[in-house]
Image (cartoon, rainbow, N blue to C red):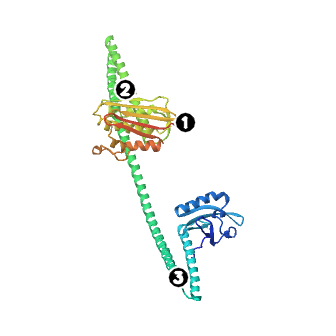
Amino acid sequence: MIEEQPALFSILCDSQTNILVFTRDDLGISQQVASGQPFTQLIDPENREKALNFLVELQTRGSAFGWPLTVYVNGQVLLLYFAGGMNGDGFFIIGTKAHANINQLYDEMMKINNEQVNQLRKTIKQQMVTAPARKEETQLYEELTQVNNELANTQRELAKKNVQLQQQQKKLEVLNQTLRSTIEELQKTRDELIQSEKMASLGRLVSGFAHEINTPIGVALTAASAIDETTHTVNFMLNQEDVSETELVAALEKLSLASQLTMSNLRRAAELVSSFKRTSIDQTVETKRLFGLHEIIHDIIVSLNSKFKKTAITIESHCPTTLNLYSYPGIMSQILSNLMLNSLIHGFDEGQLAGKIIINAYGEDNRVHLDYSDTGKGMEQEVLEKLFEPFYTTKRARGGTGLGMYICYNLVVTRLKGTISCQSQVGTGSQFYINFPLETVSTI
C-alpha cells in the first residue's frame, strides 16, 4: 500500500525571510503571493505576530516545528502547520495541513537540493557537449557531483539515524512499562505496610484498653462482693429477735459505701468502653463525620494511659470544646497516637526519662492548628531531615518499622490536605506543627 503524501507547499527564503521561490505548491498559494515579498505576507493578519515568533525561533535555533498559522487560500482561511530549517544562507519553510515532523522537512529539503544540483549538472553537461570543455567547468561539474554524493550520503545517514531513534523509542516504551509496573507494585506494597501499621496501632489500642479497664472492673467486682456479703449480714440481723442498732447502721453504711464504689468504677469502665468504641471504629472505618476535636484528644490520652501511667511523663492538652470538625476522626486518632508513641519510645527512651507532652489545638483563619511538643531528648539534624521518610528508624534493632512518622505525614498531606513540619534540637525536645483546612457542616 502506497502511503498518501500530505498536501503542502514549500518555499525558499533569503536571509531576510523574503520569498525567493515556491518549490512546491499543492494548495495554490503561489498564485496569491509573488516572489520577493516577505514570508509574513502569506499569513492571516491576525496571526502575523505569531508568524514573527516562528521566524525568530527559526533564525535563533536553526529549525522550528509544529507552528499553527492561518493563511488565505482562494478567499478562505486555512489552518496550516509550519516547519522550517536553515538552507545555506537562507531558510526552507513548509506548510502542511497536518503536523510536519523532522523527517518530512528533511525529505523536502533533500528533494529540492537534489533537483537543484541535478538541474545544474544537466545544464553544465549540455554546455560541455555543445562547447569544448574548459578546466573550470570540468572542475565545477566534479564539485557538484561530489556535493550531490555527499547529500545522498547525508540522506542515508539521516534514514539510518531515524531507524535507530525508532528502535530506542521502542526500548524506552518497554522500560517505561516496566517502570510503571514496578511503581504500581511499590505502591501496593506501601499500602499493605501502612494497613499493617494501622492494625498494629489498633492492636496496641486494644491492649491498652484491656489493661486500663481491668482496674475499675476489678474494684467494682470486689465492691459487689462486699455488697453481697453485707446484704447477707443485714438479712441475718433482721431475722434475729434482738438486733443491735449500732451493728445494723454500720452494716448499712458499709453497704452504701460499697454501692458508691461499685457505681463510680462501673461509670469509669463505661467511659473507657465508650472511648474505646469511638476510637476503634474511627481507626478501622475511614468515614467523615462531625466530631469535637477535644473528644478525640481525650480518647487517645485515655487509650494510651496504660503506656504512660508507670512513667514520669505528664500529658497536657488544650483544645476548646467548641472546635468541631467535619473530617476523619480515625485519621486524627492515628496521627495523635503515632506522635505520642514516638515521644514515648524515642523522646523519653521507652519511658525511662521524665518529661512533659503538650497538645495545643485551635482554629484560626478557617484552618485547624495542632501544635504538639515534648520535652524529650530531641533529634540530631540528620535524623530530623529523614524523619518523614518511609522505613527510616533509629530503633530498627528493637522492632521499629520506620512507618510511624511517614504515616503521619501521608495522612496530613494527602487525606487532610494540610501540612506538617517538625523542629527539634538535641536536649530541647521536639515540636510538631500541623495545620489543615477547617471544614464544618456549614461549609459543605
x, y percent for residue 3: 57, 74
Q: How far apart are the alpha carbons under marks 3 and 2? A: 119 Å
What residue sits right under mark 2 in the picture?
A: 265
Q: Is residue 334 visible?
A: no
Q: How many marks?
A: 3
Amino acid beneath label 3? Glu
Residue type at the position of mark 1? Val
Q: Is residue 350 left or right of residue 185?
A: left
Task: Please tell me which residue is depicted at 56% across the width and 37% down the height of the picture.
Answer: 443
Whether the residues at callouts 3 and 2 have beta carbons within 8 Å, the answer is: no
Q: Secondary structure at mark 1?
A: helix
Give the residue type that dot 2 points to.
Asn
Q: Compared with residue 2, is residue 49 higher up or lower down, i.e. above or below? A: above
Location of the C terminus by quadrant is top right
Mark-to-mark CA distance, 1 and 3: 93 Å
**Residue 441: mark in rendering:** 1
Callout 2 environment at 10 Å: few (<14), some (14 to 19), or many (20+)? Answer: many
Q: Which residue is mark 3?
A: 136
